[in-house]
Amino acid sequence: MAEHGDKLGLSKEAYDMVYEGFWDLYCKKPHASADIPVKKLEGFLSKVKLVVTPSDTADEEGNVT
C-alpha cells in the first residue's frame, strides 16, 4: 500500500498516519489525548493477526496469484 498508494487514492501522509497509529495501538502506546486505557487495547490486539503472505501462492485449482 505504501508503494502504490497513488493507485488506491491514498496519500503518503494518510498512509503514514494510519501506519504509525496502528503501531502505537499495537505496542500499547496510545496518544495521551486518546483517553484509551491500555487494558481496552488488549481486546483489540486479540483480534489482530499479523501475517506475511508468500509472494507466490496458488489457489486450490493451482492458479498462481
Image (cartoon, helix red, strand yellow):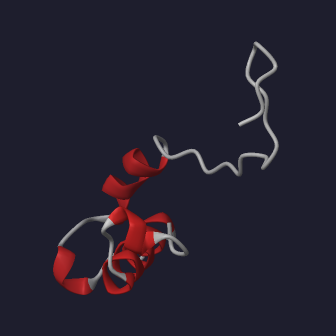
Q: In which quarter of the image is residue 43?
A: top left
Q: On the rendered structure, is 12 left or right of 3?
A: left
Q: Position of residue 42 (x, y in %)?
A: 43, 52
* Residue 28 visible (yes or no): no
Q: Nearer the viewer, residue 61 or 41?
A: 61
Q: Give me the residue at 39% from left, 74% from top.
A: 6
The residue at 48%/72% (across/down) is 23
Above or below residue 23? Residue 54 is: above
Which quarter of the rendered picture does the C terminus lie within? top right
Q: Residue at x 55, y 75 (%)?
A: 3
Residue 58: name its quadrant: top right
Q: Can residue 49 be seen in this view?
A: yes
Q: How many marks are shown on the rendered structure?
A: 0
Left or right of residue 5, residue 40 in this image: left
Q: Which of 9 and 52 is in front in this view?
A: 9
Q: Image check: 1 left or right of 43?
A: right
Q: Residue furthest top?
A: 61
**Taking 34 as reference, is 49 above or below it?**
above
Which residue shows up at 40% across the image and 66% down it?
7
Most foreground residue, 3 or 24: 3
Residue 36 in picture, x, y percent from top left: 23, 66
